[in-house]
Image (cartoon, coloured by chain):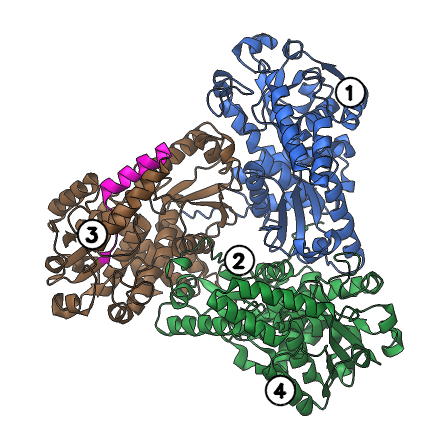
Chain colours: A brown, B blue, C green
Amino acid sequence: MEEIRKLIDELSRLDYHNMYYNDFFLTWEKTFDELQAVFEVAEILRKMRESNISPKIFDSGLAISLFRDNSTRTRFSFASACNLLGLEVQDLDEGKSQIAHGETVRETANMISFMADVIGIRDDMFIGKGNTYMRNVSKYVQEGYQDGVLPQRPTLVNLQCDIDHPTQTMADTLHLINEFGGIKNLRGKKVAMTWAYSPSYGKPLSVPQGVIGLMTRFGMDVVLAYPEGYDLMDECIDVAKNNAKASGGSFTITNSMQEAFKDADIVYPKSWAPFKAMEKRTKLYEQGDFDGIKELEKELLAHNALYKDWECNEEIMKLTKNGNALYLHCLPADITGVSCKQGEVSEAVFDRYRTPLYRQAGYKPYIIAAMIFLSKVKDPVATLNKLLDCKQERIYNYHK
Amino acid sequence: MEEIRKLIDELSRLDYHNMYYNDFFLTWEKTFDELQAVFEVAEILRKMRESNISPKIFDSGLAISLFRDNSTRTRFSFASACNLLGLEVQDLDEGKSQIAHGETVRETANMISFMADVIGIRDDMFIGKGNTYMRNVSKYVQEGYQDGVLPQRPTLVNLQCDIDHPTQTMADTLHLINEFGGIKNLRGKKVAMTWAYSPSYGKPLSVPQGVIGLMTRFGMDVVLAYPEGYDLMDECIDVAKNNAKASGGSFTITNSMQEAFKDADIVYPKSWAPFKAMEKRTKLYEQGDFDGIKELEKELLAHNALYKDWECNEEIMKLTKNGNALYLHCLPADITGVSCKQGEVSEAVFDRYRTPLYRQAGYKPYIIAAMIFLSKVKDPVATLNKLLDCKQERIYNYHK
Amino acid sequence: MEEIRKLIDELSRLDYHNMYYNDFFLTWEKTFDELQAVFEVAEILRKMRESNISPKIFDSGLAISLFRDNSTRTRFSFASACNLLGLEVQDLDEGKSQIAHGETVRETANMISFMADVIGIRDDMFIGKGNTYMRNVSKYVQEGYQDGVLPQRPTLVNLQCDIDHPTQTMADTLHLINEFGGIKNLRGKKVAMTWAYSPSYGKPLSVPQGVIGLMTRFGMDVVLAYPEGYDLMDECIDVAKNNAKASGGSFTITNSMQEAFKDADIVYPKSWAPFKAMEKRTKLYEQGDFDGIKELEKELLAHNALYKDWECNEEIMKLTKNGNALYLHCLPADITGVSCKQGEVSEAVFDRYRTPLYRQAGYKPYIIAAMIFLSKVKDPVATLNKLLDCKQERIYNYHK
């Protein structure tokens, strides 16, 4: 309890008033204090729950989820976060809805929001689309709120778009904060965000883009490595450069996985698709050119196959700081000999880091809950202290 | 708060004791007092929620939903209403169930109801089927309750059938009550319920049938307009005639959209299918005659296309009272140039009425909640007053 | 209330401490006291709910359901049980998840469990698979809990596997306890668990196996009857033999339905597939031999058809004790002339027992809730007494 009070005290020294009744799209739109507030609240909620104290703040209310891509962990993380705070998740299944029948985004956004406090969207498949869609939804519910159509304005939480994956990278960073003993200890740490080979193709760019856009905020030395051609969005590269300059860290790009791993404290090897290919694919889909899509797929798989040596195995791990860098992945990973013939990571490396990897994933529900909490509660410090005073048990376990 | 107490006071003067432990199938089976009780409770619940007071009356309990047609707004309205009162929605997805394996309606109705307080059904596709199905479910759970199989009797809420769409038309009417400043002010108002062109076919008849069956209760002048052949069920026409006589309003039918719009206070232009064609389609489905269905579809689309001029645009709107009638639609509307080439309403008219249209839709969750409340609570006046005294916050927002 | 206190008092004399933080896989892994504790808690929860007292013990928390087979009643029973205790069900829909993308069982089990208190699994289709899968999930969440990945360990509830169907057979037995006036009165009763003809094939073996594995615990005379070739798993036969010996009852096998029904107090006629055929089918699926599967299906249906006279009708019912044995079925039953041309039971027999059959099914939600309760609450007696003292109303129904 003392530990939680201390975290609330830290929270009270931050300025995050702009988060109230606001959305969470991209980490680089948030101030340092705001990011830190998310980490603090996430840890407070986590420790409250582990102490069997319920932080439920909603007596009723809906959380709408819209997943335009398959998902296990983000789906369950969102459901867990909402349930913890007292919201019931209603999935907007576009197949079961009338959206196909000519309903506009503006209309749907309002129709589902009469009692919605949160809308979580995953839309990461098409370049230039996902983030735009989320901002449209946000704009339309803001209008609905102002026009008196909606009695409350639902908060948008970006559960992964074409640009960023903030709930993932914030969870990754909270994991680092706890592994390295505090946000200040991240300063000067070298993190290698590298491409890795996968037999599948077309994996979203939002994780590497999000990682270089976020981890450069903390004075870290961020190295981005990928084979020629696997560029990310220019916008994100610029963000990373500017962040590094401002935070006193560094940001460099290399085409050598080895160079990136050299003396790294943290490695994050993960497959992604070339930005330009994804742009092209988006256009082909718009044109309904399915032959072109098949052709592109073939090309991309062939291109990928040139870089099968981009695997995170024990040999390349030896190059890292003390041969012992912290291995990160957003999961599921393509594990050589387990989930595919040849993949992003060897079984030995993956197995060695399994427990920290699972812990890393375990932060996501609390990060999402913190984002919702900070958007919905006017005075988070007073409310958290009061929740702590009330000590409402999460599991009722009476014994004399 | 004073406003809410005043509404509760109004409620206390109505006789609605028959609604307790009863279903809601058709508005014309309800007395005037019962309809008014639904409006009052809907407004009380809405204002409580807007004052951050939770009207949750269920500590646990299930609400079963069964949708035999795609739905966004009704699905979310039902989920919102149930969540507000404390019920968790469980969707009876007939694909995932064993219903296909020879289970009878009687059995399913009981099997899903052991802890169910509400069953909401949408079954509007086949003439003579949907309402009948709902009544069967109701009969079987009543039997189960009497036989001691079910510890409580779930309330049936008609979320749209082949005959009526009471949660829609009650929400529409509550919208009118608030727009015109009270239920008494509806007296003498002219409402035009008219057919409108849509490129799709086979739209349910339950909205126009429900509108003429309900709005004739309030002394309004209801005009039903449609091109020759687009008749509604005879039963509903009779209901409207009798209602109009009893309420001191009027009910007329015309084949001219212009005549209907002339001096109208309210217009409700909306596509529907000819009753006889829908009856024929139901039979073809029963016979498994898919060629016949295709043939019928072709005929109906061709017939529809003869009436493309039945569009609600600025020109015809000029005929209405001060050129300024309130435009209603149950949404989604077929908007010319937006959701289709040529549709029910022009973009200009739709855009001008967008905000009131969205407000209209926003009443539906509260109408559904009110129907459930009045069926489940023995002494609604005492319970609502007590909820108001307790002031349980919907969002917990502590500040000193 | 006195009745509930008396049941709590009975509970207090049982030893069930091993159930805390443990799973429920097979009834024969549980002690007699543990089974009795489940019956007692199920009845306590049922009577509390019927007295409008909420036994909610979770302020938040998820219950994960994974159904690998269609289901109505088990799905709704699980949802009802979880809702009653305060848990929100999240369905792990394998189609919508990334499990297909090479994710391991170990990983999924942990990823969905960060805030999960219960995991309910139905996996009954393949011999040697379902139970094994459940135990793997249990093992992996235990590891995750010990490694600090999971803050709590979710309880596994077997909602039907290839071996046993404990929530069904426990509900069946609670039904018998209440019909015969107490668990002690089951001693000496004759129960006929018999095969019956069905036009479908490949029905799971878990119900007959579970019934002979459980009902032999109470000193009953259990007779298993099936046509030659329709053997069950050897393991379950051994369990039944040993149970009968230990409990002072008996267990016999016959190939005559008549012999089984003779003087029976209880009959449970139900179709199942031959164990060896199911083993073969599992192998054919593993080999992807779809021609072989079709061939096997044809064989099995032809073989089934030899035993169309294995029907529970009024004639064979006359052989039972006073012609009046209690007819059981897990539902849905194949009813001759109703759900199929020729099936497991005649319409007359089914109709006569409809109400008790529905009551039988109604125990399942409480059995599941009791299993969860005993696994999650450290001091069930103190907690139940306290819940009874608090008298939190399930439906808030204030009246002066």
Q: Would residue A347 be found to the left or right of residue A226 on screen?
A: right
> Can residue C122 be seen in this snapshot?
no
Query: Would you name the residue on which mark 2 appears?
Result: C89
Q: Position of residue A284 (x, y in %)?
A: 32, 36
Q: Which mark is residue C238?
A: 4
Q: How dense is the environment of label 2, judged by Cα within 10 Å: few (below 14), some, or many (20 and up)? A: many
> Mark 3 highlights which residue?
A215
Residue corresponding to mark 1 = B244
| Marks 2/3 same chain | no
Disc 2 and disc 4: Cα gap in Å? 36 Å
What's the distance in space between the residues labelled 2 and 3, CA to CA? 36 Å
Amino acid type, label 1: Ala
Disc 1 to disc 4, C-alpha distance:
76 Å
What crowding class fits label 1: few (fewer than 14 Cα within 10 Å), some (14-19), or many (20 or more)?
A: many
Mark 3 touches mark 4? (CB < 8 Å): no
User: Which quadrant would the N terminus of chain C be assigned to in this image?
Assistant: bottom right
- Name the kind of residue labelled 2 in the image: Val
- Residue at 73 percent across and 44 percent down: it is B133
Q: Nearer the viewer, mark 1 or mark 4?
A: 4
Q: Is residue B234 above or below residue A391?
A: above
What residue span does the magenta drawing correspond to? A269-288
Quick check: do tags 1 and 3 share a chain? no
Inter-mark Cα distance, 1 to 3: 70 Å
Q: Chain of mark 4?
A: C
